Amino acid sequence: MNVLRLRAFASALALAVFTLGATPVSPMGTVQKFVDAFNKHDVTGELAACAPQAGIIDDFPPHAWMSCADWESAYEAFNKSDGDTGSHVTLGAPWHVDVTGDVAYVVVPTTYTYEHKGAPVTQNNSVWTLVLKKSSSGWRIAAWAWADGK
């Protein structure tokens, strides 16, 4: 391999690694990015995975929001009032990752664990259904519905 080819290859590889780290290149990459941030209680990271407006349905009141930021605020307030701490989501193997152009439909089973007033709780078989849209900044969560497992 000559020096010019080696330099071109190294530059392309560095660009690919930098790009992969900065912007998820797949819908599941964005979903995982959100979950990783959620598990670290990194609200900024969570919001970075979301579109500015995102329709959200979840199991705690008021059950519907139009942005990840509004959902996050309600989630924190609900957990505080209910005595829940230590939230953690683990994703299973996705059931659907259907991509049509710049829109993706994702269905993934999850396990949700937390402590309720100091007692451990595990919700197996929860299901998270999401719609993601691709823009110039990558895939972003545009909507989701969460269904608790037991």
Image (cartoon, helix red, strand yellow):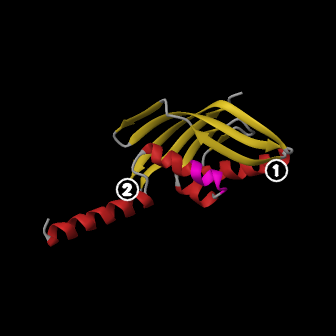
Q: Is residue 52 visible?
A: no
Q: Is residue 29 left or right of residue 147?
A: left
Identity of the residue furthest to the front in this view: 1
Secondary structure under tag 1 reads helix
Q: Is residue 82 visible?
A: yes
Name the residue carrying label 2: 136
In the rendered image, the quadrant that contains the C terminus is top right
Q: CA distance from mark 1 to mark 2?
A: 37 Å
Range covered by the magenta-colored residues: 35-41
Residue 16: name its quadrant. Answer: bottom left
Identity of the residue furthest to the left in this view: 2
Q: Position of residue 99 (x, y in %)?
A: 38, 37
Q: Residue at x 52, y 52 (%)?
A: 49
Depth check: give the residue in front, 1 or 134: 1
Q: Is residue 120 left or right of residue 8?
A: right
Which is more foreground, mark 1 or mark 2? 1
Q: Residue at x 55, y 46 (%)?
A: 54
Name the residue carrying label 1: 80
Amino acid type, label 1: Lys
Amino acid type, label 2: Ser
Residue 114: name its quadrant. Answer: top right
